[in-house]
Image (cartoon, rainbow, N blue to C red):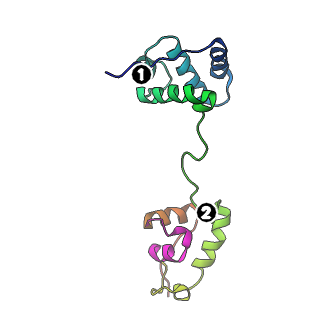
Amino acid sequence: MPKPIELQLSDAEGEQLERIRDYHPKPYFRERAAALLKIAAGQSGRDVAQNGLHKRRKEDTLSAWVSRYRTDGIKGIEIKAGRGRGPPFFPQHKTADSAHPEIQHTLGRDPHQLGGSQSRWTLSAIREVCDWLKNHTPSGVWRTLRQLKIHLKRGRD
């Protein structure tokens, strides 16, 4: 059986967490502050995780919030920069507006001019020619082209 989650708060810490719970502009901050306050009030981590928040959480998640709060204070419950989905055109192109002209220029040329052996562009050929698409799968290249609103057309006479 896992050790119960416990948290001792000073009066100042409790007031600070109450202000965050009631007034912070970011919802995840309010949720985490509410969870910390409930655990500090003596509720079990399991009860808070299952029924004490708007969304059910794993008890391990609450344990991680408490642990980070103990070591780093309020900064510990903040989502760190660099988390989440990475940019789709990184590192050469930060936005679709900067990637679109380069890929459009490449696709407007004959594949033979860029060392291709085929007369038409394929997803694999595009991936080989564009350095910033080398780590993409053919499906990833297709999704990137779709995001840039570039559509491949059938070969024409």
> Disc 2 marks which amino acid?
Pro
Q: Quadrant of residue 151?
A: bottom right
Residue 99 in the figure: left or right of residue 141: right
Q: Quadrant of residue 104?
A: bottom right
- Indicate whether residue 78 is drawn in magenta: no
Figure quadrant of the N terminus: top left
Instruction: Residue lying at the far front in this picture: please name it.
Output: 71
Which residue corresponds to the image point at 45% horizontal and 86% vertical from the top-left? 118
> Disc 1 marks which amino acid?
Gln
Point out residue 15 in the picture as x, y percentages from the top left corner: 66, 15
Q: Main secondary structure of the magenta part?
A: helix
Circle 1 or circle 2, nearest the eye: 2
The answer to whether 13 is drawn above or below residue 61 in the figure is above
Q: Which residues are magenta?
A: 122-137
Residue tagged 2: 91
The residues tagged by marks 1 and 2 sit, at their Cα atoms, a distance apart of 41 Å
Q: Please, what secondary structure does the residue beneath circle 2 have?
A: loop
Q: Please, what secondary structure does the residue beneath circle 1 have?
A: helix
The answer to whether 95 is drawn above or below residue 26 in the figure is below
The answer to whether 86 is drawn above or below residue 145 in the figure is above
Residue tagged 1: 50
Point out residue 90 in the picture as x, y percentages from the top left corner: 59, 61
Which residue corresponds to the image point at 54% horizontal and 20% vertical from the top-left? 36
Q: Residues within 10 Å of mark 1 (few under 14, many from 20)?
A: some
- Foreground: 147 or 34? 34
For the residues bearing labels 1 and 2, Cβ distance under 8 angstroms: no
- Foreground: 55 or 5? 5
Q: Quadrant of residue 75?
A: top right
Which residue corresponds to the image point at 44% horizontal and 65% vertical from the top-left? 137
Instruction: Residue lying at the far left in this picture: please name it.
Output: 1
- Foreground: 60 or 150? 60
The answer to whether 84 is drawn above or below residue 71 in the figure is below
